[in-house]
Image: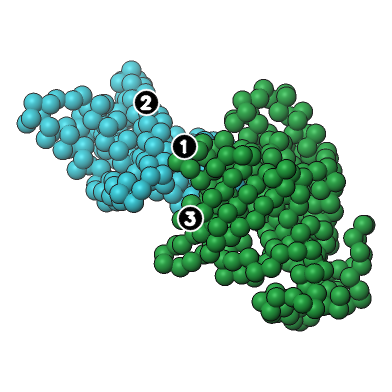
Amino acid sequence: MASFLALMLEYWPQVLSGLGNTLLLAAVISVTGLAGGVVVFYLAISGGPLRRRLTEGYISFFIGTPLIVLLFLMYYGLPQWGLKLTPFTVAVIGFTLNVAAYNARYLMTAFRGLDPDELQAARAQGFSDLQVFQLVILPQVMRLSVPALTNQVILNLKDSSIAFLIQYAEFFAQMQDLAIRSFRFLDAYLVAGAVYLALVSVVVVAARWLERRYVLPGVRRAR
Amino acid sequence: MTLLSVQDLKLEYDGRIILDGVSFDLAQGELKVIMGPSGSGKSTLLRCLNRLATPTGGRVVFEGRDVLGPGVDERALRQRIGFVFQNFALYRHLTALQNVTLALRHLRRMPAAEADERALRQLARMDMQAHAHKYPAQLSGGQKQRVAIARALAMDPAVLFFDEPTSALDPLMSREVVNILHQLRDERVSMLCVTHDLYLARAAGGRVMFLDEGRIHAEGEVDELFGPNADPRVRAFFHQELRQAQTAPPIDVAQPMDQAQPAGPSGPAGLAER
């Protein structure tokens, strides 16, 4: 193990850039996935039955399809039609479509817990549908969904490692590279696992803080 | 002066007749109570008047304008009508103060300081200024109701609609609501109150309309409405409510309030003897 850590030190720019790429991808898809989730959620709860069915179809499709299929389709499939995208672009698009579907589902679940009278009261006050969404629905469902949404961020961080399969030079890809150079596969994967665990722990601490900070007044949770 | 005039209002939904030609007027500064059993169309009637529901026929003239016409600005109309819901419907992620300022800030585009000042004035009017920074979950039912009323009043509406204001409250708190209705009536606030609560209908002190199966069957002062010549439907409703009240634990819902007359020792039964 000590010699592998020495190897990591020797190749530190490579390891560090991999770590940077992992964090960049996880951060970007967490933001775009949340924004996308909010948009899909809005489309799902406003408008007529057709739109509702379309958004429900979107959510079911992306939750039901393995992400790796989508990534391979875009990265290895689309060039057949002359469309060549960088690994980062493919990863961002693929993850965003997937993560947005999950986030939209979380928000819709929370939405079912809202008091319909509150929404009617807002309309009775003269708010537009968009204002009701912005001022009454979204602040509540976001706060109710903090545990699910932060959990998704953790998944994003861990799952970003599959972008290695479409040549994105993230942390796991670099560790794989070092493993092949040194033939120390066991050490490499143990270290990779420990690093992901450490990163996730940071997110977990932040998530618990967010949960405490944004708990909806009057919502009690089981302990 | 007539503030609100409802003429032959009809609503059919799914082949069912909900409102079957309702007509009445509400004068400026008047308090009117619409009473009737559950499912009589009372709440739907209120929702037709601010267009949360769409009637299938009839005419509603509010502040001199036909509000059912095609070119009506629904959102402007709703801002002229304060609506108090039966379970208060406060926004639970906002404090009492924020509940009151939300519409001032986002519909009136009022600067924060001005909105706060105005909201605090309304909360004070409802004797709730001490609770301005509490969340709905930290307030009692009666306090929530007061905040809901302050929220409605803050927009300076031409009329206040109350939808079953006491149905989620215990008798003691119902009495508070009656006190508020009296206070607002003394301030010449126009009000339309829908209820199936006999105590409220009687104690509110306005004219009472009896709505059943989508029609108004009787209208008058409380005493004539429930007097010996009462409409048979009114009588039937009344006896049913009375039975429910008698099987309920013995709480004197009609004990003397600050100004209201006592209804006799047996609670709502006092009504029957009048």
* Circle 3 SS class: strand
* Discs 2 and 1 share one subunit: no
Picture residue at 76% right of the left edge, 52% below the top? B31
Where is residue B149 shown, x and y percent of the image? 73, 46
Q: For mark 3, name the chain.
A: B
Q: Report the amino acid beneath label 2.
A: Leu
Where is residue A26 shown, x and y percent of the image? 37, 32
Q: Report the amino acid beneath label 1.
A: Gly
In space, the residues marked 2 and 3 are separated at their CA atoms by 60 Å
* Discs 1 and 3 share one subunit: yes
Which quadrant, please, contains the N terminus of chain A? top left
Specify the chain shown as green.
Answer: B
Which residue is nearer to you in this view: B34 or A146? B34
Q: For mark 1, name the chain.
A: B
Closer to the eye: label 2 or 3 = 3
Q: Which mark is residue A48?
A: none
Q: Which residue is mark 2?
A: A24
Q: Which residue is mark 3?
A: B57
Q: Report the amino acid beneath label 3.
A: Gly
The quarter of the displayed image where residue A172 is located: top left
Q: State whether residue A222 appears in this view.
A: no
Q: Which residue is mark 1?
A: B71
Which residue is nearer to you in this view: B229 or A152? B229
Where is residue B228 shown, x and y percent of the image? 80, 78
